[in-house]
């Protein structure tokens, strides 16, 4: 289940519509001859927009999370996986990986089965979330996006199922309190979460 995590449990799940967007700033300019110049700083973060449904009748856990985290504190969500990834994957959990900082390829060990491209992944030695850009069967090399921020030492635990946690903050325009849609049911409408990089 994908949603807001507190003390190891999901306290509120994400509802449709849901979008997970890669924010990679680029700067463009056109010359008088209409030649376009594009430059990028090589930075990236994930941004998620979704409805949020409390998992308790009173919604008190979500209310406390909204008020205490506000827009300044970092908290954790489970990263949604693409439906195609979920339906096609057969790879095992308990995998390990290694890779070099700024590299776009990692080597996976202790894995059996198929992991499709588009799988959201995370490594135990740092909090950035990545996406695979190539398919892999069993172990071996797989491409990722964005490039690794830090080196992933040999035998680092590798998360690629519904256990991929992302450190996020609420976007500045998210309501940090309660909104009731019918006097009983708490609703935020659509909330936006930005990856803490």
Image (cartoon, rainbow, N blue to C red):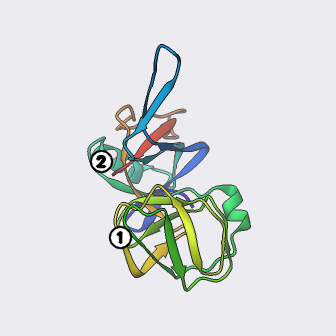
Q: Position of residue 135 (x, y in %)?
A: 66, 67
Distance CA(mark 2)–CA(mark 1): 30 Å
Picture quadrant of residue 178:
top left
**Nearer-the-camera pick, 125 or 53:** 125
Residue to which mark 2 is pinned: 69
The mark nearer the N terminus, 2 or 1, is 2
Q: Are marks 2 and 1 in contact (CB under 8 Å)?
A: no
Whether residue 161 is visible, yes or no, is no
Q: Position of residue 84 (x, y in %)?
A: 71, 58
Q: Position of residue 65 (x, y in %)?
A: 35, 50
Which residue is depicted at the point 60% across and 81% down?
Answer: 139
**Nearer-the-camera pick, 188 or 92:** 92
Disc marking residue 151: 1
In the orientation shown, which residue stands out farthest toward the front? 33
Which residue is depicted at the point 54% across and 57% down?
Answer: 2
Vertical side of 100 occupied by 50: above or below: above
Q: Viewed as shown, does residue 183 lie left or right of 60? A: right
The N terminus - image quarter? bottom right
- Helix, strand or loop under label 2: helix
Q: Position of residue 47 (x, y in %)?
A: 46, 44
**Nearer-the-camera pick, 96 or 39:** 39
Vertical side of 66 occupied by 7: above or below: below
Q: How many marks?
A: 2
Crowding at dot 1, Cα within 10 Å, few <14 / some 14-19 / many 20+, comes out as some
Crowding at dot 2, Cα within 10 Å, few <14 / some 14-19 / many 20+, comes out as some
Whether residue 15 is visible, yes or no, is yes
């Amino acid at each position: 289940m994908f949603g807001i995590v507190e003390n190891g449990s999901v306290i509120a799940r994400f509802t449709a519509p849901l979008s997970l967007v890669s924010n990679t700033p680029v700067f463009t300019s056109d010359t008088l001859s209409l030649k376009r110049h594009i430059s990028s700083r090589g930075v990236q973060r994930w941004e998620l927009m979704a409805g949020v449904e409390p998992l308790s009748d009173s919604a008190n856990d979500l209310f406390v999370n909204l008020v205490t985290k506000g827009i300044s504190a970092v908290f954790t969500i489970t990263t949604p996986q693409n439906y195609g990834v979920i339906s096609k994957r057969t790879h095992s959990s308990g995998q390990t990986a290694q890779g070099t900082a700024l590299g776009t390829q990692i080597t996976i060990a202790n894995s059996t089965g198929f992991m499709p491209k588009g799988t959201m992944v995370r490594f135990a030695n740092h909090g950035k979330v990545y996406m695979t850009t190539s398919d892999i069967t069993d172990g071996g090399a797989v491409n990722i996006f964005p490039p690794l921020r830090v080196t992933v030492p040999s035998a680092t635990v590798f998360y690629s199922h519904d256990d991929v946690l992302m450190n996020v903050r609420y976007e500045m325009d998210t309501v940090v309190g309660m909104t009731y849609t019918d006097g009983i049911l708490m609703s935020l409408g659509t909330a936006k979460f930005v990856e803490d990089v």
